[in-house]
Amino acid sequence: MAGRPGPSRRPAAGRALLPAVLLCLCCRAAPERIRYAIPEELGRGSLVGPLARDLGLSPAELPARKLRLSAEKQYFTVSGENGNLYVSERLDREQMCGESLSCAVSFEALVQNPLNVFHVDVAIHDVNDNAPAFSKAALHLDIVELTLPGARFPLEMARDADVGSNSQLTYQLSSNPSFSLAVKESPGGKKQPELVLERALDREKQSSFELVLTAVDGGDPARSGTVQVRVNVTDANDNPPVFSKSIYEARVRENLPPGSPVLRVRATDADAGSNARVSYSFGNVPDGVRALFSVDSESGEVRTAGPLDFEERSKYSFGLEARDGGGLTAHCEVQLEITDENDNAPEITVLSVSSPVPEDAPAGTVVAVVKVRDWDSGENGQVSCELSGEAPLSIVASSGGSYKVVTASALDREQAAEHRVTVVARDGGSPALSSRTALVLEVSDVNDNAPVFEEAAYSAYVAENNAAGAPVLRVRARDADAGANGRVSYWLAGGSAGAAPYVSVEARSGAVYAQRSFDYEQCREFAVAVRAQDGGAPARSSTATVRVFVLDRNDNAPRVLWPAAGAGAGAAAGAGPFEVVPRSAEAGYLVAKVVAVDADAGRNAWLSYELVQAPEPALFRVGLHSGEVRTARAVSERDAAKQRLVAVVKDHGQPALSATATLHVVLAESLQEALPELSERAAGADAPAELQFYLVLALALLSALFLLSVALAVVARVRGAGPPAVLRCLGAQRFSVAGAAFPADFCEGTLPYSYNLCVAPGRAVAEGAWLPPPLPSLPAEELLGGEPCGKPSPSSSAGAGEPPADADAPQVGKPARSRSSPRAFPSRRPLFPGASRGGGAGAALGRVPARERRHARALRLPLDALSHRKVRVAP
């Protein structure tokens, strides 16, 4: 069998011819099989063949493909630079293959990326490196002197470890007139040398002969071996032993225990006595045969001496010799055939494992190559392989007893990071023998999974007025991949308009932090998109929406819209809004409505109203939720004319915030009755400011007049002139300004009522012009006692068609309308009682009481310019 060692003998001189007989043949027998042929005894480093080129690989591909060899014994090596196959060990065909006619070394060539296996056979050709050899240094023959010429005496055959023509032997005998050499060819093709007696022997003349037998092989150059043949001439042994068969054959089971009988040979001798006693022994046989078999010298029985192994050698052929007491010999051949038993389980050799395998490897990718070999023969050596275990793998038979483990379907590292399978090889014997080997296949990760957020949308609730940098929430995404492919980082990927500056996200942890303090009143909610991206190449990402709801806090106090605090401050610092309530008002009379708003929301914006200060607590009440100020009872004469009400507006926050609203109420049937109260209030409010202003103004005027007088006096004294024209002008008659003066507008932002005051219009003169002297300056009492706008009294002394008493006096026309007011005064009565009953303005003013005239003067009306214009006077 190829690859099994065997005994050999060779002279060292044969190695000198090896480089000259180098033979290298290369042919492709199959798509995955490469065959080379080389002679034996090549030196280390000798070229076998261009393996990489024959596999279709270029030298540039070798580093990536990782070409390597897999064999039980490394007789060869492959170069990593050029991919050539070289001899790495001494090749002795006789030791490797024994007497087998063919000798080849088989191994596998493996390439990676992708994994593939190629079977390589290197045939070892025999060279004539062994000379024929005899087992004995000398052969002894006893020939009776009475032997007739022509008798033949078998001689020992020589052995040549070579095969083929190198082992074909021819024999030569040294020249001697008494003997010649003959060769007898056996049925097996072997040549048996025989010594032939040419003439009668005479012991008295010559008792012994020295001959030389030479064996020459058929090699080129031929090699030879010699042995001495010593012939003794004896008396009276006329008949040599004779075997019953020239060839004995037997079939022997392997694994027989030592001492088991194999066969029996038998030889007979026609002589009598000691000359007829036959003994048996081995002829010229190898030492390996003597170690496995023994022959009984008396009975000729051949027994086993050692274990027989069919896998090591299936046939044995050796010679036996029978020798009688007179020294005559006979030879026979024994041929034994060893029968196989199923005594060898299949052997599994893992040639290569591509681990780890990327999970995106397509189906059919080779992940491992195993070689299964059963040294038995026939059905005992027929092997089947299968995979045991749950894995998306399958095993496919290849040539040369190799099997490929390939992927049967797509791999998924996230479901199984490794696959453990068992390769089971089972032969066809009875009983069947099997063997197992485990394969562990790791699956490497590829970036085939995008990060997945735990939630598609996140909601966070943050109270307003939070601190900048406060945590809002944490988003988390998981990536089923491993290593950098599963390392997730986060960042903002957009959101609602203006939302990006509000929050930030930490790249590693996914924590979302507030970038600023939130204000519920400015932004109640916003959304941002957070992207999670892994570290693969190319990277994969996913997006989740984070919606942040800002929760309201009670951080805004109620704001009073009406009555507005400080209304009318431009006219009088202390004048505030007021309402006139008739003394005839009954319970439930609507005085005013406090209007307030709160910028907060929810309970923080629920407002309640409460009256906290009033001179007459039982007179007024305020609606808890409406803010309407109404009379709680009927107004009586005992109630004070001026009422100052303070209402507090309070929200429902925790803690509650509040604001106050001040409302001035005048109890009067008409505005005429309310004027005294208003004038006192306005005068009292304006007194401090006016006093300070007049003091500063007087001081400035006095200083200016003093400086001017001194300057003019100095100038007049120096120039000796009269008084300057400017001083003369000081005595001229001066007139008041013709422009109309109006009282402060108390309606701006306060009470939604308007009053009509009708006065006679003046001439159409520019504002700031001086009035002519004939125009009388009417007191305020006369103006305030006139008729309502557009309704002249029928008893007036001046008729519609009557000319005026003075031609220069202005004509009374239609009154001018003021801008429309939200609500007209309900009564539209004259401002003062009795104003409509007189004939003219003078009559009306004459009926105005003196106390009311003083109140009119307190209003600081320019009475000389007023006519029947409509003037809106706020209470």
Image (cartoon, grey):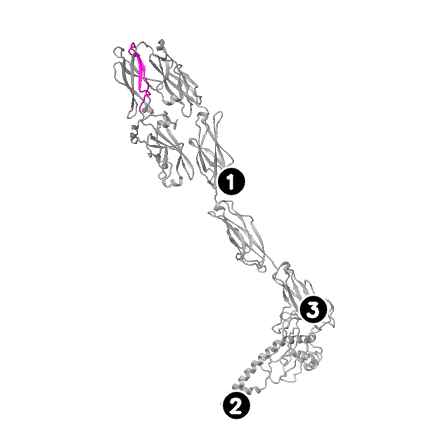
| Secondary-structure class at tag 3 | loop
Disc ID at residue 416? 1
> Which span of residues is magenta-colored?
131-158
Return the residue at label 2.
Answer: 722
- Specify whether residue 133 is painted magenta: yes
Q: Is the C terminus in the top left, top right, bottom left or bottom right quadrant?
A: bottom right
Q: Amino acid at mark 2?
A: Gly
Residue at figure coordinates x 29%, y 9% from the top left:
146
Crowding at mark 2 (Cα within 10 Å: few <14, some 14-19, many 20+): few
Q: Quarter of the image holding residue 755?
A: bottom right
Q: Earlier in the sequence, mark 1 or mark 3?
A: 1
Foreground of the two, 761 or 554: 554
Q: CA distance from mark 2 to mark 3?
A: 68 Å
| Secondary-structure class at tag 1 | loop
Return the residue at label 3.
Answer: 614
Residue 380 seen from this side: yes
**Position in image of residue 833 (x %, y %):** 71, 77
Q: Is the N terminus in the top left, top right, bottom left or bottom right quadrant?
A: top left
Residue at figure coordinates x 37%, y 20% from the top left:
318
